[in-house]
Amino acid sequence: MANPLSVPNAKLAVKVPRFVYGTAWKKDQTAALVSQAIRSGFRGIDTAAQPKHYEEDLVGDGIREALRAGVCRREDLHIQTKFTPPSGQDPSNLPYALSADLETQITSSINSSLRHLETEPSTYIDMLILHSPLDTIATTLAAWKHFESWVPHQIRSLGISNTNLSTLSAIFEHSTVKPALVQNRFYSATGYDGPVRAFCEENGIVYQSFWTLTGNPGLLKSGAVKDAAKEIGVSREVALYLCVMGLGNVSVLNGTTNAQRMREDLDGLETWQAWVEADANRERWEAIMASFRRAVTR
């Protein structure tokens, strides 16, 4: 199993796998795909209390099926879910009352997630992620403060998604429980999130990319990715994942629905880690990454 990323900002020992299985838009196939992902070797699962795009209850069904089958233990898994503000919800299908105050909305959402993701012998969430900042910094900080009241018992660590640097900096400065993870779209329109990634690296925060393949057809054709694929002996898609991971303390969301691709991606990660640890390959890998960094520096 590839080495996970340590989270120094977590109250308890939390490790984020290099690949985390994304469960958005899986609909009625969610449970079967989550179970298949765990059986294939994924040890991280990402979901959200956002019925518009996620079937969080079916995510729980898939996790429990794999645990009952003895594939792994609960403590071997990293399960992360999200509180989605009203702006990201379907008003006709919410995990909380739209008329409720913010603290009550958060409490209702977390309790819903805990029910959906219930496991034996104990139920907890490894990471609660704020799906997006709220309308103002003050409101965002108020939401984060309520998040903190759940740590470290039923929730082990906190993260934020779809954030910019100013919001991330404000949360980091004013929080007691520091953000352990930033989950952002990785693509050219944001300059590949360079300033945010730099802040994460400086402050012990895991950066988790999504839209990594779909949003980067140009990077798939880049010389660095072609070279990585050839040298390591993996597909170009896997090579792109590996180059993104090579940028630093980076985890990648992977939402494939193909069982063969699940295994190929995980095998590629293992192959890379063995390849890059060999003295003969380190200089070549550094050269590949220097080229890739130039490609994602804007």
Image (spheres, helix red, strand yellow):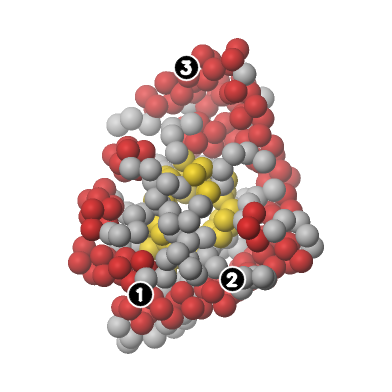
Rendering coords of residue 49 (x, y %): 48, 71
Pointer 2 local density, CA inside 10 Å: few below 14, some 14–19, many at least 20 = some
Task: Kindly identify the amino acid type of the residue bearing the numbered disc 2.
Answer: Thr
The quarter of the rendered structure image containing the N terminus is top right
Q: Residue at x 56, y 50 (%)?
A: 20
Q: Is residue 134 visible from the viewing direction of this image?
A: no
Which of discs 3 and 1 lies nearer the camera? The answer is 3
Task: Kindly identify the amino acid type of the residue bearing the numbered disc 3.
Answer: Ala
Rendering coords of residue 33 (x, y %): 68, 60
- Residue carrying label 2: 123
- Residue carrying label 3: 287
Rendering coords of residue 265 (x, y %): 65, 40
Which of discs 2 and 1 lies nearer the camera? The answer is 2
Q: Which mark is residue 223?
A: none
Above-or-below relation of 189 to 80: above
- Residue carrying label 1: 86
Sequence-first disc among 3 and 1 = 1
What's the distance in space between the residues labelled 2 and 3, CA to CA? 45 Å
